[in-house]
Image (spheres, rainbow, N blue to C red):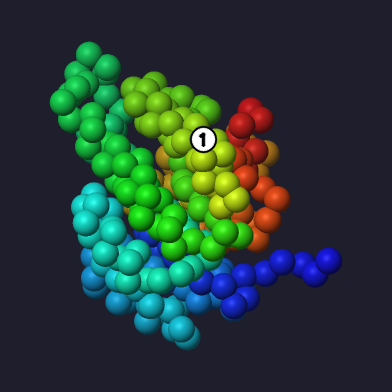
Amino acid sequence: MPVPTLNGQKVVILGGTSGIGFAVAEGAAAEGATVVVASSTQAKVDAAVQRLGGTASGAAVDVGDESAVAAFFAGLGAFDHLAFTAGDWGQRLMPAPFAELDIDGVAEGLRVRFLGALRAIKHAQPHLSATGSITLTDGLLAHRPMKGAPLVTAFAGATEHLVRGLAVDLAPIRVNTVCPGLVLTEHLSTWPAELIRHFTERQPLPRAADPAEAAQAYLYAMRAGYTTGQVLIVDGGAMLV
């Protein structure tokens, strides 16, 4: 049986203009896929498409606006794989004493990474190949809670359970999620080196990942035709210590 590749397939990455998402776009394009990247800022989309070159294209879309998400996918036509790497958990979910939790603001932490993913899946699914895939993103705090951030753990865990349910509900479309540890994205570049070292020094691989290394899990999830409902952990061995 030939080794599967993404050559000739169409891959859509929401959040594909920077960080892990851009690395996924680069990796898919290198295998011969037609790549479409999207984010909320047109200037970032234009810059990413220029960097990718070839047949890459993109569009600005606010994943918090369901009508915009629906229009985006309607304009794409048929495609093979969706990767969702957009968003963060929001400033309101940064580590803080639980007694100070803004209950009314909790939903803001779900707006992009969880509810945005739901909107994307809802409107992408009719256009996806029956042999295609959806790959979401959560994070290591789903498994390694940090003091002051219980909601991040809860929301990341919700993504993992969503994937298991969707893998059954949307079959034969495959649905997985990638659970990265620390990755050297543009956001992480603002962290002091000492802080990154503090979080990674006890790992078997005592460093943060390059985005291209994390991207390999998404590319595997797209290629792996018998893998669905899974959490692909890319953490340098952090779960072992």
- Could you tell me the amino acid type at mark 1? Gly
Q: What crowding class fits label 1: few (fewer than 14 Cα within 10 Å), some (14-19), or many (20 or more)?
A: few
Viewer-side residue, 218 vs 80? 80
Above or below, comparing residue 191 to residue 58 in the picture? above
Residue at x 47%, y 85% (from the top left corner): 54
The residue closer to the viewer here, 142 or 12, is 12
| Residue 142 image position (x, y, % from top left) | 48, 30
Q: Residue at x 57, y 73 (%)?
A: 9
Residue indicated by mark 1: 165
Location of residue 128 in the rendering, given as x and y in whole percent from the top left corner: 49, 61
Q: Quadrant of the N terminus?
A: bottom right
Could you tell me which quadrant the C terminus lies in? Answer: top right
Residue 95 falls in image quadrant? top left
Q: Residue at coordinates 51% horizontally, 51% vertically from top-left? A: 135
In the image, 36: left or right of 165?
A: left
* Callout count: 1
Q: Is residue 44 visible?
A: no
122 horizontally vs 181: left or right: left
Dot 1 lies on which element? helix
Q: Is residue 171 above or below residue 186?
A: above
- Quadrant of res 61: bottom left
